[in-house]
Amino acid sequence: MAQLSETYACVPLTERGRGILISGDPKSNSILYCNGRSVIIRYLDRPLEVSVYGEHAYQATVARFSPNGEWIASADVSGTVRIWGTRNEFVLKNEFRVLSGRIDDLQWSPDGMRIVASGEGKGKSFVRAFMWDSGTNVGEFDGHSRRVLSCAFKPTRPFRIVTCGEDFLVNFYEGPPFKFKLSHRDHSNFVNCVRFSPDGSKFITVSSDKKGLLYDGKTGEKIGELSAEDGHKGSIYAVSWSPDSKQVLTVSADKSAKVWDISEDGNGKVKETLTCHGSGGVDDMLVGCLWQNNYLVTVSLGGTISLYSASDHDKTPLLLSGHMKNVTSLTVLNSDQKVILSSSYDGIIVKWIQGIGYSGKLERKVNSQIKCLAAVEEEIVTSGFDNKIWRNSLHGDQCGDANPIDIGSQPKDLSLALRSSELALVSIDSGVVLLRGTEIVSTINLGFVVAACTIASDGSEAIVGGQDGKLHIYSIKGDTLTEEATLEKHRGAITVIHYSPDDSMFASGDVNREAVVWDRVSREVKLKNMLYHTARINCLAWSPNSNMVATGSLDTCVIIYEVGKPASSRITIKGAHLGGVYGLAFTDENSVVSSGEDACVRVWKLTPQ
């Protein structure tokens, strides 16, 4: 049996020059955000408890809890809204095609009966309000000429809807059925977000013109604005009200978050500027925020979620971060402390500690893309798409300076001799490159198209897998490789090969969904019929005691086999990662870590069957 014990969630998918609109449920103290086709539910007081909804066919853009917290409406780039339950395995209630293009925002009416959505559309249909159970339209929304970035439902009767967008307009509608009442053009740039105060008395709009304007919630008339004194120096991307309707939180491209006191007459003064943590780079621009219960939540362009205390702004915020893109490789750095390193193809390496979660990002001087990652004691070795290998020493969360090793061709696979960590084997299309430290010892043309490679922990032997499905075994002496044997069993290109930790066996996987465990001395098949995936095998890992081997596939599953038992007594983890599994590692005999295209990392506890 395998049970999910921890999820290290992906971060919200962000886009430069655009805000993201996150939301939450005060009752369960959870927040919602989107990444790829996934909608992520995170609990602010239980960061390792994460739920993921992955039923959208297209990239999800925004999601909101219904007022009673029982339902979630989520939208995507195709203009579709799905309404699903927060319990019973996310049962689907309804699905409606609402707009002809991307949906940027949606809001429930306070009675939970209606939903308004806004975004891109054809003609003049940038906004639509409909009944949640039937999809029936509940109004006409004229008055916008360009994409509508945000919309809001007045939380008290009489109901009102406000919309704002790229045409610099703020439009006010009365209903239901909703009809256009009035329009304001007080902003001089994109209006990024509009929100009603919880008591319904006011609403606020924020814009790329660095201004925040306040309006009467019932009549729609402008009543005041946020003071320019101590104001934002960059585009304001999002705004959120305090539960008592007396303050707002704003975030900006100027990398700051501000708390404002809102007076009865509708003007705002800065009460506090929150100090934001980061290096001050572009990734620290703030693009999303939420005021929920006693938490002030901000989201940076790099995806980092900061949780501040609303009652004590000086308290150091809790940082939640992770990957935004496909996590392509995993390695366990220190099995005593259960330190896990994961890298995503956009060049980010994240450090996790089992039982704690996010522990920081590894800061590298050059943030190049990463294809392969290997680590040994105080060193990490990475290869990318730029023909270079980087060997960085590790000091806490800092990577020491390293000069890249240009191997002249794109690296396909990378393996370290763990007991003589100086030695590394890199496969390229035509053969392999042998490295000792930062020196290229030899570049060897093997005469066939290479797909994967591995090197024994003592550096005495290497196995190279070909595009033709053959495994070539070489002895290593000095800077030369001597072919000792060729093994033929696979019926497709080899994708991955790894020696067992005790070096007595090795395992290989291929594009034709088969894995094989071999005895290293006799070179006989030790575990056969490992044919339970339905698509290519992307990764495999051995348990520290060499008793188990796990495989991860494009079919979204992880399968764990025990070497001494028939393959049919396997453990299968179905749907481990939406879009496919790309990284696997064991932290101990009973814990396997997986990563995938959904940008999440998960820890699974194994119990004997």
Image (spheres, rainbow, N blue to C red):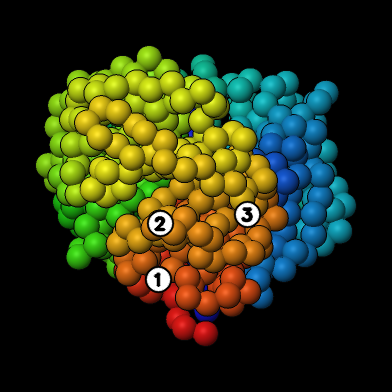
> What residue is rendered at 29% in x and 37% in y?
476
| On screen, residue 437 above or below 315 | above
Q: Find out whether the residues at labels 2 and 3 contact each other: C-beta distance under 8 Å.
A: no
Residue 371 lies left or right of residue 418; in this view the side is: right
Which mark is drawn over residue 520? 2
Residue 2 lies left or right of residue 69; in this view the side is: left
Q: Provide the secondary structure element on which disc 3 rests.
A: loop
The CA distance from mark 1 to mark 2 is: 15 Å
Give the mark, 1 or 2, whose residue is nearer the N terminus: 2
Q: How many marks?
A: 3
Which mark is drawn over residue 547? 1
Where in the figure is residue 609, as x and y percent of width and height? 52, 85
Front one among 94 and 499 = 499
Front one among 116 and 559 = 559
Give the mark, 1 or 3, whose residue is nearer the N terminus: 3
Given this view, does label 2 or label 3 mark the residue nearer the observer?
A: 2
* Residue on which the image places disc 3: 514
Tell me the amino acid under the disc marked 3.
Glu
